[in-house]
Image (tube, rainbow, N blue to C red):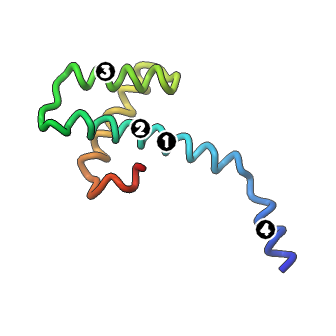
Amino acid sequence: MARLFKFFRSKKPTDQSEEIFDTIEMATAVLLIEIARADFHQDEYEDKKIIELLEVHFSISHADAQSLFEEGQKKADDAVSLHEFT
């Protein structure tokens, strides 16, 4: 039993928090994309606004925000439901 407690205490929380941050970024991107698609019409203005929001909110470069948006679109296309992003 003591070995079990030692095992859980030895895990580094920083690795986990980094994964959560990446997950939060992706979930935010996917949910914003799905909101833009809700009216069955997604235009260039909405795409630019989503990229801008990602850039400002997460303090990332425009290129990183663009990349996050593109990856988010792929995940949104492949998603069966939004549950995994909430």
Location of residue 61 in the rendering, given as x and y in whole percent from the top left corner: 47, 20
Q: What percent of the width, then of the height, locates residue 58?
A: 51, 27
Residue behind mark 1: 24
- Give SS at disc 2: helix
Cα gap from disc 1 to disc 3, whole angstroms: 18 Å
How far apart are labels 4 and 1 at the CA level? Answer: 27 Å
For badge 4, the amino acid type reads Phe
Q: Residues within 10 Å of mark 2 (few under 14, many from 20)?
A: many
Can you give x and y, in whole percent of width and height, for residue 48 in the image? 28, 20
Q: CA distance from mark 4 to mark 2?
A: 33 Å
Could you tell which of marks 3 and 2 lies nearer the N-terminus?
2
Q: Closer to the camera: disc 4 or disc 1?
A: 1
Q: Residue at x 37, y 19 (%)?
A: 52
Label at residue 28: 2
Q: Residues within 10 Å of mark 3 (few under 14, many from 20)?
A: few
* Residue topped by disc 3: 49
Front-most of residues 5 and 70: 5
Residue underneath mark 4:
7
Observer-nearest of 3 and 32? 32
Q: Earlier in the sequence, mark 1 or mark 3?
A: 1
- Residue 38, which numbered label? none
